[in-house]
Image (tube, rainbow, N blue to C red):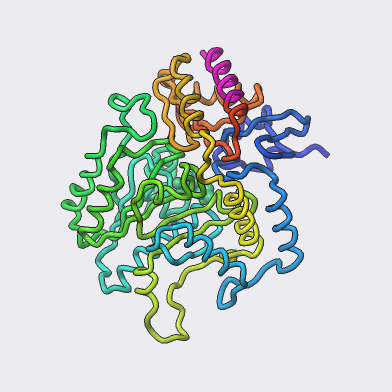
Amino acid sequence: MENNLNAYWMGFTANRQFKQSPRMFSKSKGMFYYTPENLEVMDSIAGLWCVNAGHCRSKIVNAVQQQVAELDYSPAFQMGHPKAFELANRLTNLLPNNLQHVFYTGSGSESVETALKIALAYHRAKGQGQKTILIGRERAYHGVNFGGMSVGGMVANRKMFANLLGNVDHLPHTHDISKNAFSRGLPSHGMEKADALNDLLSLHDPSTVAAVIVEPISGSAGVLLPPKGYLEKLRAICDQHDILLIFDEVITGFGRLGDSFATNYFGVTPDILTTAKGLTNGTVPMGAVMISDGIYQAFMHGPEHMVELFHGYTFSGHPLACAAALASLDVYEEENLFQRQDGIYQYWEDAMHSMMNLPYVIDIRNLGLIGAIELEPVAGSPGKRAFQAFLNAYEAGLLIRTTGDTIAFSPPLIIEKQHIDRLVETVSKVLKHLT
Ligand code: PMP
């Protein structure tokens, strides 16, 4: 029987367009996907910023297979299993000393909700229940749940849903191609945008503000890099007013920038850090929130038989996810994928910027193994040109991601020079034929 394609309502997808000519993958290996017709499509986005060690890595496959046969599920409340503790220790070892505790979730969105709830509960636990305001940023993406959507600032993701969280405000975004176009690495201009936090604090009174949440690099809004000095400034202002700083590292975690986490790359330590995606190399859904010791200890009072935090998920610390994450960390470490030493980051930067004279290109951005090409939008039809580029690239055997009029690249961290050459060649052809 032929499948009715409308039975599956796909998320973040132009369903009517897709169902006229569906794009399917049935296999993957290393840098590549394969369609049911066995056409090879090179993956320039690591699935969705998650398959950092490349597809179907045998060590991870074996670990998951073994785990499902050994311990398939273990209750997440009042019971534990050894791999969940082992993983928490492995993760905290990768992070600055301050971040010593891990809370497991099932996704990036759940990590963000968890982080926001812990921030609010922390202030209450400290007797500062008036600290309830959460500050996010314009053009931020923090997942799709109500908290993340509310602190997020992508207009399209919010405007359909009337009931957002109250007590939320937003900083301005830092993207400014009038000053920073074609910067290599971090943009030089715009650090003063962090001063807007002081303005919001005067407006609300700092004693009412619980937390500031930012993506060190925003991905979903089109790869927006923080101006030099910006994150440091946010940290200093938060410290001054006893406000928690949350880094959403769902895309920047696990090697994307050429270091394990953005917090290490930038040398700025948040109080709470959210992750997901690369944690299990995309194989089993899992997220994790890393929490400072000061926050954890604020909850460790009261009678010993009492639950300290009324929050958690049935699938928190799922054995399959823990096994997948431990094997992923092994692969990342064995192959030194967080900090490659073979000049790949420079090769990537040069390759990205070699595309600056292609038609419609108005900006190119890069950092670590992230790249973005911003295209001039078609008047009155934002996103249309980039979407056409996505379709044409797919036909030419390259999976890219577009968000608005930006093409975003975040390849598996195993990418080699010949793959980068192939990417540039295909994207160049695609852009030359765009209208
Ligand atoms: N935060 C950030 C910064 C993200 O990029 C994403 C996903 N792209 C999320 C949260 C949400 O993650 P998930 O889709 O796993 O819920």
Q: Position of residue 406 (x, y in %)?
A: 46, 28
- Which sits in the foreground, 138 or 432? 432
Q: Is residue 327 magenta?
A: no
Please identify the quadrant where the N terminus is shown: top right
Specify whether 77 is left or right of 235.
Answer: right
Res. 154 image quadrant: top left
- Which sits in the foreground, 207 or 175? 175
Residue at x-position 22% and y-position 53%: 237
Residue placed furthest toward the right? 1
- Which sits in the foreground, 22 or 315? 315
Q: Position of residue 416 (x, y in %)?
A: 60, 32
Residue 194, above or below 323: above
Specify whether 172 is left or right of 94.
Answer: left
Res. 180 image quadrant: top left
Residue at x-position 73% and y-position 55%: 62
Residue at x-position 51% and y-position 33%: 343
Specify whether 206 is left or right of 306.
Answer: left
Report the magenta residues as a range: 421-435
Q: Position of residue 137 (x, y in %)?
A: 33, 45
Q: Position of residue 84 (x, y in %)?
A: 58, 67
**Majority SS type along the magenta span:** helix
- Which sits in the foreground, 1 or 186? 186
Residue 342, above or below 168: above
